[in-house]
Image: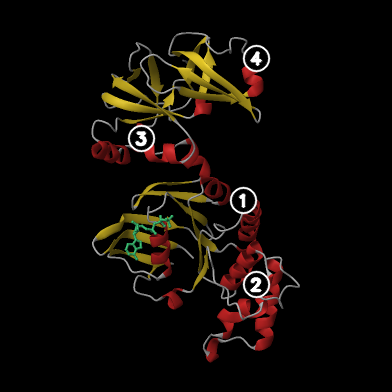
Amino acid sequence: MDVSIKNIRKEFQGAIALKDVSLDIRSGELIALLGPSGSGKTTLLRLIAGLEFSTRGSIYFGGEDASAKSVRDRHIGFVFQHYALFKHMTVFDNIAFGLKVRKKAVRPDKMLIAKKVYELLELVQLQGLEKRYPSQLSGGQRQRVALARALAIDPTVLLLDEPFGALDAQVRKDLRRWLRALHAQTKHTTVFVTHDQEEALELADRVVVMSAGAIEQVGTPNEVYDHPATPFVYEFLGSANVLPVHVRDGHIRLEGFETTIATHHPNGSHQTLVDGRGELFVRPHDFELCDERHHAIPGIIRMIRSFSGMTRLEIAVTGLERLITVEMQRNHAKESAALAVGARILIRPRQFGLFPSRSDSAAKSAEISQIHPHLRVIQDGAG
Ligand SMILES: Nc1ncnc2c1ncn2[C@@H]1O[C@H](COP(=O)(O)OP(=O)(O)OP(=O)(O)O)[C@@H](O)[C@H]1O
């Protein structure tokens, strides 16, 4: 079922938890709400569920305004981080619960309920454990029972709040893959909350990056990682070097250098850049070494480290307080004989994001980068 969130604002005793959030979730999609603590992820999930009601705005389920509907009427399946299974009930009874408590008129008979429970046990790969009690299961098994229980009612939407948050790293990874496969099979519209970037990028069809009660960007894992729309997304998803620059007449000039980096827009047209102070965001692996000074940034290698097939360089650049981090494939680095601590090298960003300087006025810049996400540019391949 499609879920459409329109201009939702949520205040708690005057404090704003969600500012003006709009989001369209397509039927069958697996969506991750990703953001730091307090960014509003759980509040948004609880609003979709009907556990919380918005101060302003509406929520539509399949085109129908569901804003005033109760949890039960929205027909939602839930799994929480510490999902309390009924301790005194067996796995079978826990999974059957949602069907058994239905009103008589719509309650399936005993045989049908048992059939459904056995199907679900197979789906979550817990066949043979139906007579156990929750205390006799591992944490990962308990979460799979919780998921089977949520799926038993054939929910319109499945909501997962940090479902694997309490489990150890390896179990988490296994369950992540398992959930991805399960979703491919059942195709329930699913929204899950996480503050784990890797989990969101690995699992979701689309990632909703949230910060301070607002959506920063919505996109596929590749879109949000490779083409962040805001400085926040650049820094929250992976690491980035931030270089202070001046933009003038369509050229980007690094402070303290005459070096300019010509730019053109990904669609081939020349980009009109706002003149003034800016910040250039470059991921460590988006730098390349080069031989020509033209359009290059000169620096001195301060540190070299190789691990897991990668070589990481820390490079000092005159005029920049912080070292620039550059990462490349180790065999690529080996080809370059000049790599040694103290050596002078030239680097060039292959891809970068450009945003108005936040230090001019943090609030104003944040506003500008939201309004003008098209300021992102790709370096001219001609160099
Ligand atoms: N019932 C409540 N009463 C008052 N303030 C609340 C309530 N629930 C949430 N908030 C506030 O709303 C903001 C968003 O909280 P929310 O739980 O949605 O964030 P989150 O992104 O899910 O964080 P976390 O990852 O820590 O769970 C926070 O500032 C929080 O303190």
Q: How crowded is mark 3: few (under 14 residues within 10 Å), some or many (20 or more)?
A: some
Decide which of tag 3 and tag 4 comes sooner along the chain. Answer: 4
Please tell me which residue lies in front, 313 or 101.
Answer: 313
Whole-angstrom CA distance, mark 1 to mark 4, is 36 Å
User: Which residue sits furthest right?
Assistant: 128
Task: Residue under label 1, please give it.
Answer: 169
Q: Where is residue 313 in the image (x, y as percent from the top left)?
A: 54, 21
Q: Residue at x 62, y 58 (%)?
A: 179
Decide which of tag 1 and tag 3 comes sooner along the chain. Answer: 1
Whole-angstrom CA distance, mark 3 to mark 4, is 36 Å
- Please, what is the three-letter code of the amino acid marked with disc 4? Glu
- Please, what is the three-letter code of the amino acid marked with disc 2? Ser
Give the quarter of the image for residue 20.
Answer: bottom left
Task: Residue under label 4, please give it.
Answer: 335
- Looking at the image, is mark 4 or mark 2 nearer the viewer? 2
Task: Residue under label 3, please give it.
Answer: 374
Q: What element carries label 4?
A: helix
Q: What element carries label 1?
A: helix
Residue 172 in sight from this viewpoint? yes
